[in-house]
Image: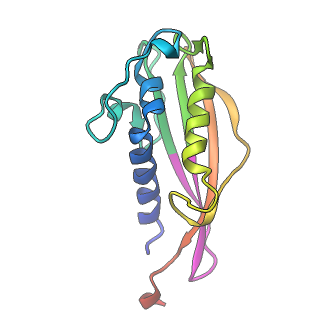
């Protein structure tokens, strides 16, 4: 398996899982400060949240109002064998500061928790060999008006198909 195909597949699987999650879609799309009053927004591949979950690194311009995003960035950490490589996917939860405060807590914290529930599944990982590990997540300021989380996850993937060895 080429080094970069697996990275594209990881991001696509995560995007699909995020768009199927009602809490994620509602937190990305609804404005206001009370989750109890949120409308359920359509989930899945036809969700209006489709443009708020990006499989590339993205930071919104300061003129973008009332919008929240989840973006991603990938890395190959090492690939020193013909069999396995270590990869990372860094998830960025980016929330407009005008929308971050909810009665239930920080919108960014709630979105980060939902992302972790999707990726931190123990014995049934969304992708990877042997599970997905969280490392050094931190709150960050992206640019004026946007704050959120930078959450790196690590896993192992096949480096080559068996017939190529």
Residue at left 47%, top 32%?
Answer: 24
Q: Is residue 135 above or below residue 31?
A: below
Residue 70 appears at what percent x and percent y? 48, 34
Visible residue check, residue 77: no
Q: Of all residues shown, which one is farthest toward the left?
A: 46
Per the image, is 13 magenta?
no
Residue 67 shows in this picture:
yes
The quadrant of the picture occupied by the N terminus is bottom left
Q: Nearer the viewer, residue 121 or 83?
A: 121
Image height of 165 relative to 80, above or below: below
Residue projecting furthest to the front: 36
Dominant secondary structure, magenta: strand
* Image point (66%, 28%), residue name: 140
Magenta-drawn segment: 73-90
Residue 27 image position (x, y, % from top left): 48, 24
Q: Using the rendered view, name the quadrant where residue 137 is placed.
A: top right
Percent position (x, y) of residue 135? 72, 48
Front position in the image: 114 or 142: 114
Q: Is residue 160 above or below residue 43?
A: below
Drawn side of residue 141 relative to residue 98, left or right: right
Residue at x-position 50% and y-position 15%: 36
The residue that appears at 41% across and 59% down in the rendered structure is 9
């Amino acid at each position: 398996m080429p080094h970069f195909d697996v990275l594209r597949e990881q991001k696509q699987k995560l995007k699909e899982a995020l768009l199927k999650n009602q809490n994620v879609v509602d937190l990305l799309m609804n404005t206001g400060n009370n989750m109890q009053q949120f409308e359920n927004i359509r989930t899945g591949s036809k969700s209006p949240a489709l443009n708020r979950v990006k499989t590339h690194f993205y930071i919104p311009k300061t003129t973008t109002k009332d919008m929240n995003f989840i973006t991603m960035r990938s890395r190959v950490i090492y690939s020193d064998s013909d069999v396995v490589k270590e990869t990372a996917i860094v998830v960025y939860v980016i929330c407009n500061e005008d929308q971050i405060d909810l009665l239930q807590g920080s919108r960014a914290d709630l979105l980060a928790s939902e992302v972790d529930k999707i990726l931190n599944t123990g014995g049934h990982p969304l992708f990877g060999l042997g599970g997905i590990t969280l490392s050094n997540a931190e709150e960050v300021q992206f640019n004026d008006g946007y704050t959120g989380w930078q959450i790196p996850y690590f896993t192992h993937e096949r480096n080559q198909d068996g017939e190529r060895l």
